[in-house]
Image: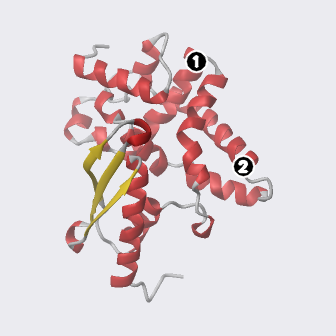
Amino acid sequence: MKTDSRQSAAMQRVQQQLGYQFKETNWLRQALTHRSYSARNNERLEFVGDSVLNYTVARMLFDAFPKLSEGELSRLRASLVNESTLADIAMEMNIGDCLFLGTGELKSGGFNRPSILADAMEAIFAAINFDADFQTAEKVVKSLFQERIRTVDFSNQGKDAKTLLQEALQARRFALPKYRIEEQTGEGNEAQFVVSCDLGELAWIGRAQGSSRRLAEQAVAKEAVAWLEQQYPQKNKKK
């Protein structure tokens, strides 16, 4: 499997963001390989990564919310462990820059497809497990989900603003939003991001600032949800 200089640099950045350096980089390469590229791909790794992810998030929720029932914990986990959340994490880490995709997937924009990005994230958790051990993979998952769990919104069944906006737009048959980093200053604890959210045909563009890309996106998505519900209220919801 060939790796060009761009992909190598992207893979190194991903490892820095994960806080884990692979001893055998072939594990990472396999986790980033789609079935359209090679028979040695990430599908089997996804199977293990899904279990690592579900257990770790379940344990985090169990410890964080001792008064919640089994059903409430299950609903919260489902709101956190899904394609949308995993794809968001992958986009924050620019996973698409180092994916190994077949020609067809490259032409069709597979490096931005949520399902492909989410699968790669699950495979990465398994790859860390095999390259090191379960505890190390668990530590990485915790670092990626701790803020999401800390800021979970119970009033919306654990759904974050970006998920609510996506669902609201789909319910009204509008196109999905486009997020873009307008400005980035500082590093580490001093970092600040200005992100825009473009609702396309609705001719609404909002901007918000946050100490991370995710927080800025969530803030502007919240504004977009409020605007959408005011301008396009759903009077006749399907029962």
Residue 171, horizontal then vertical, whole percent = 40, 73
Quick check: 90 above or below 169?
above
Q: Which residue ends up furthest to the bottom in the rendered image?
A: 235
Residue 26: image quadrant is top left
Left or right: residue 53 compared with residue 10:
right
Q: What residue is pinned by disc 1?
A: 130
Q: Secondary structure at mark 2?
A: helix
Left or right: residue 54 compared with residue 23:
right
Residue 216 vs residue 155, the one in the foreground:
216
Q: Is residue 116 visible?
A: no
Using a 10 Å C-alpha cutoff, classify the residue at mark 2 as few (fewer than 14 neighbours), some (14 to 19) or many (20 or more).
few
Residue 105 vs residue 131, the one in the foreground:
131
Quick check: 200 above or below 191?
below
Type of the residue with mark 2: Ala
Q: What residue is pinned by disc 2?
A: 64
Residue 35, horizontal then vertical, whole percent = 38, 29
Residue 134, horizontal then vertical, whole percent = 65, 24
Q: Between disc 1 and disc 2, whose residue precedes?
A: 2
Q: Secondary structure at mark 1?
A: helix
Residue located at (47% from left, 10% from top):
24
Q: Quadrant location of the N terminus? A: top left
Q: CA distance from mark 1 to mark 2?
A: 28 Å
Residue located at (44% from left, 25% from top):
31
